[in-house]
Image: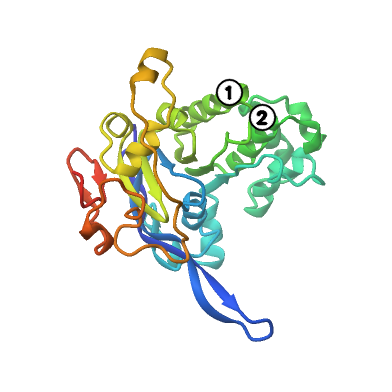
Amino acid sequence: MNGDGVLVQVEGLKKHFPITRGIIIQRQVGAIRAVDGVTFDIYRGETLGLVGESGCGKTTTGRTILQLYRPTAGRVIFDGIDLTAVKGGELRRTRQRIQMIFQDPYASLNPRMTIARIISEPLRTHKLASGKEQVERVQELLQIVRLNPRFINRYPHEFSGGQRQRIGVARALASDPEFIVCDEPISALDVSIQAQVVNLLEDLQDELGLTYLFIAHDLSMVRHICNRVAVMYLGKIVELAQKDELYDHPIHPYTQALLSAVPVPDPPLERKRQRIILEGDVPSPADPPPGCHFSTRCPVAGKICSEEEPPWRDVGGGHFVACHSRG
């Protein structure tokens, strides 16, 4: 981490999607608790990894931080500005400084737009450039992401998945942001292309001083690119630590189970190590279990785990965990 203070503060963030019944008159009968009270900081110049199985709320967390979804409760403070309290023109001006790289490079680019129009969209929205200056900026952005600037009049279908994701990166960079949410930016790409995109993101971070929230499934890649890692389960952060500390000394049983599934490139060691197989299914976010959300699948859960929510505590050295049984 090479930053000089906190850039993003997430405090008690919740995002609940209402469940309604009725055709003419709809009434709310419940809620999907996609994000259920998460708290963490992101420092300037760092990459914070957010990991967890599908459906745990990672993408919703990223979109709620950017105010693409308005939160049900909690605060998101970006460089001293409470994003949950601003709207209209002030929110639009702040959004110039925060951007997102989407997961699917095929769905996130409008097939009817040329590459020039796609990348220049933030320039038009924020009135940053027009005319010849806009064209020159688009060409510069294509060069930054290692694409030929003569591609500006082509359409998305003329590019491979890796090239499309680079175009998505160029669009995110167009407004000179400080903070970018990378929502599984490599999961839809071939393995041979993934390393190229990750290396590009690392180079851009060094060159432009960017700060990332990196949402991913690939725990090996997260260890490579991230400074700290937060582990999410059913809408809650269960553990957060420096990457080497988390991978070498995981405390929460869910973190231990996740890491036990990561292949080790050493056949003798791979044969010896013990896998942790979790039993049962992930509970529904519409009806999470009381107490610790992981208690129904946890191999070391006690009585208190199903009765009381575990406190979020620092066990030393910036290693945080929410668990009654460990730490």
**Which amino acid does the dot numbered 2 rest on?**
Gly
Res 74 quadrant in image: bottom left
User: Measuring 61% from the left and 28% from the top, which residue is drawn there?
Assistant: 144
Q: Is disc 1 surrounded by few (<14), some (14 to 19) or many (20+) residues within 10 Å?
A: some
User: Measuring 82% from the left and 46% from the top, which residue is drawn there?
Assistant: 112
Question: Where the N terminus falls, by quadrant?
Answer: top left
Residue 78 numbered tag: none
**Residue indicated by mark 1:** 196
Across and down, in percent, residue 270 comes to 39, 19
Q: Secondary structure at mark 1?
A: helix
Across and down, in percent, residue 266 comes to 40, 14
Q: Is residue 30 left or right of residue 324?
A: right
Q: Is residue 265 above or below residue 121?
A: above
Question: Where the C terminus falls, by quadrant?
Answer: top left
**Which amino acid does the dot numbered 1 rest on?**
Gln
Q: Secondary structure at mark 2?
A: helix
Q: Is residue 275 left or right of residue 137?
A: left
Q: Name the residue nearer the viewer: 69 or 302.
A: 302
Res 241 quadrant in image: top left
**Residue indicated by mark 2:** 162
